[in-house]
Image: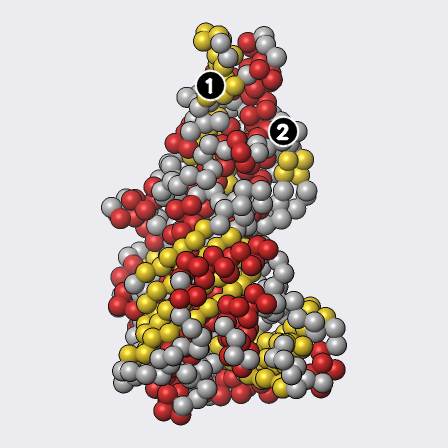
Amino acid sequence: MNSISRREFLQASGALVISVGLPGAVSTALSQNATGAAGKPPLMPDQLDSWIAVLPDGSVTAFFGKTDMGQGVDVAIAQIVADELDVSFEKVTMVLGDTALTCNQGGASGSTGIQYGGMALRNAAAEARRILLERAAERLKVPVDILVVDNGVVNVPGYALQRVSYGELIGGKYFHAKLDWNKQYGNPLAVKGKATPKKPSDYKVVGKSFHQAIVAEKVYGKLQFVTEMKIEGMLHARVIRPPNAGCGPQAVDESSIKHIPGARVVREKDVIAVVAEREWDAVRAAEALKVTWAPACQPFPPMEKLHAHIRQAKVIGNETPINKGDVDAALKGARRVIEAEYEWPLQSHASMGPACAVADVRADGATLLTGSQKPHYGRNGMAKLIGMAPEKIHASWIPGPGSYGRNDAGDATMDAALISKLTGRPVRLQYMRHDGIAWDPKGPAAVFRARAGLDAQGNVIAYDFFGKGFSRQDVVQTENDPKDSLAGQMTGYAPKGNILFQTPSEKYDFANKRCGWECVAPLLDRASPLRTGHFRDPLGAETHFASESFIDELAHEVGADPVAFRLKYLNDPRHIAVIRAAAEKAGWSARPYPNPNRGKGSVMTGRGFSYTERNGTIVAVVAEVEVERASGRIWPKRFTVAHDCGLIINPKGLEIVIEGNVVQATSRTLFEEVQFNRDQVTSVDWATYPILDIADAPEKIDIVLINRPDILPSGGGEPSTRTVPAAIANAIFDATGVRLRKVPLTPQRMKEALARGEG
């Protein structure tokens, strides 16, 4: 992301858009009201100037109301814009996630960057090209339909001197053109002009691989992260969380930090923080401050009884979105009924670094620098918390440690804003490691129960699958309201999440099929370190670990090859093609099933299969594992992934995203589980919340990309995540003959299962 402002490139018209620098050059307050700037159209989705600008040198800036969490979405969007405008990829600069410069497209959310965000930019760029060609035709005095564009230069074929560049046509000026807008903000935001975007057969940039320039900036230490942002006169802040969940402060001894220069206490109801001119003094003050807390209330069950609690807990919401045929009658008439239960733990985002935010709340407006993936919504939540109109707040997204879902970045935003308001100074709020891991919203724990009825020939005549667990939106993911933050809940905002869960996403065509879910209440309804929220591919890994493990169990029960068994119950040609592609690439047919060496040797080897869909993206995975009998260590040595997300924008970029998904999902499957006791979360660092390290990473990940230019692109940032856990579990069964149904699949659980000889 370049350090530019709209003022810098809109020069030819003399128009002043906004006097701020973009992320990467922030050293002072960034926000300035620009609504009165001469000639500037309002920042609204129905204005073409809200999306595309052409500089005097003919380069293009695209304004994208989403952010990039490391997947290279900005690169892919730049490719889309370049193709529609007929300029080179190198001529396009992206501006991301700035409330003064971009429309609210929902931030990085649900793998919608390309699927929805890309469509808006494609339509806007196509409309910009149409307008530019009309202006070129008028200037050159030729019909518009004979013009061709070569890297931003409009030519009349056969007449070398009849040419005009985009920079000459409009460079530095506004389009002042309207777009049709569906009147929705966030992920659904859609705009369209009179122009028809290009056909895939005309693409020259889309479909090629371009690297992320930001990677080199990271490697060489040139990229400025949100943790490095400074505003003149700012204070450093640390928050003090209660040692026992649900127990607020009764008294604060401010004299306990009087020996620390410049340190002081900031308090608003149950929010307690310390601030200081120097960061180390804030850290010391947070350690030294003496707080008397209310007696422990033990809001949590013993950790070993978490899933028993879920099974027994009252249902507060439920839904059965799939209910085909008469499952109960079919089960009663079945020759055999197969049943199984699966368990998934609470998991922490455990971002590489704890969250940070910088806020400057003044009487005339406010500034927010945030690493959250939703700066527009963060601004809105901040506005409610500090009592200021959203349009008076300028929020800028700055790269941070990543927030796949709703992690501690949203809480940092609210804490920084509140402390800045209370102190009257700019505030840099940085969490400590224990804050980030212990207090971030967690991925929900759940229990899944599955039943299937088989007839005498081993055909599945009934399929019944239900999940029960904590809502995936106990903390709503948008950061649009203080009620979904610790600062909000600790200052009196009543929590109110959404009751929402998940069912399997696949296309097995069973004659009688029922899939549903049930939600239970949170363990603590206010300011809980075990509150649950969106985690990468919300509930996708959990649900499909269970559903695809169960499909594998059914295949084994009837003595069928797991791939052939899946294909038997599928009719959709895209789904069938993905499964066959993964199996062929992995050489699946080269070995009989079941594994003739199952359970043999000191190191047992096996392979497992899994297939899923997510929002139009179909994925199939083959995992090959090694299991050490003595230690119980499980090593997924190799993965083969077949992936169909429609039109592929950046093949290499997509491969990198898939690799990241596989590694993170492997970590969640084998290692990650939030530890807690009756009073608090005890997972506070990498020792108490271990994740996959390089010694456990797969040796090889083979990827088969199935490009379908005739199908609009769908997301790639999450779908392969949900497909990995069951593939690993199924490979373990193939290797050992024992079935693990409780995540994480730790060495201890593996050894115990081997000792019991579970099947």
Residue type at numbered disc 1: Val
* 36 or 12, nearer to the observer: 12
Number of numbered callouts drawn: 2
Disc number at residue 153?
1
**Residue drawn at 32 percent across, 50 percent down:** 228
Q: Is residue 741 above or below residue 498?
A: below
Q: In this rendering, would 68 be left or right of 289?
A: right
Disc 2: CA contacts within 10 A as few (<14), some (14-19) or many (>=20): some
* Residue 97 seen: no
Question: Residue 318, how many percent across, how many down?
Answer: 67, 74
Crowdedness near tag 1: few (<14), some (14–19) or many (≥20) residues, C-alpha within 10 Å: some
Q: Quadrant where the N terminus lies? A: top left
Position of residue 630 measured from the top left corner of the image (x, y, whole percent): 27, 85
At x 32%, y 64%, the residue is 698
Residue 273 image position (x, y, % from top left): 40, 66
Looking at the rendered structure, the kind of residue marked 2 is Ala
Residue 369 position, x and y percent, is 43, 49
Residue holding disc 2: 195
Pick the front one: 307 or 236: 307
Residue located 30% across and 48% down the image: 218
Residue 635, numbered circle: none
Report if residue 711 is visible in the image.
Answer: yes
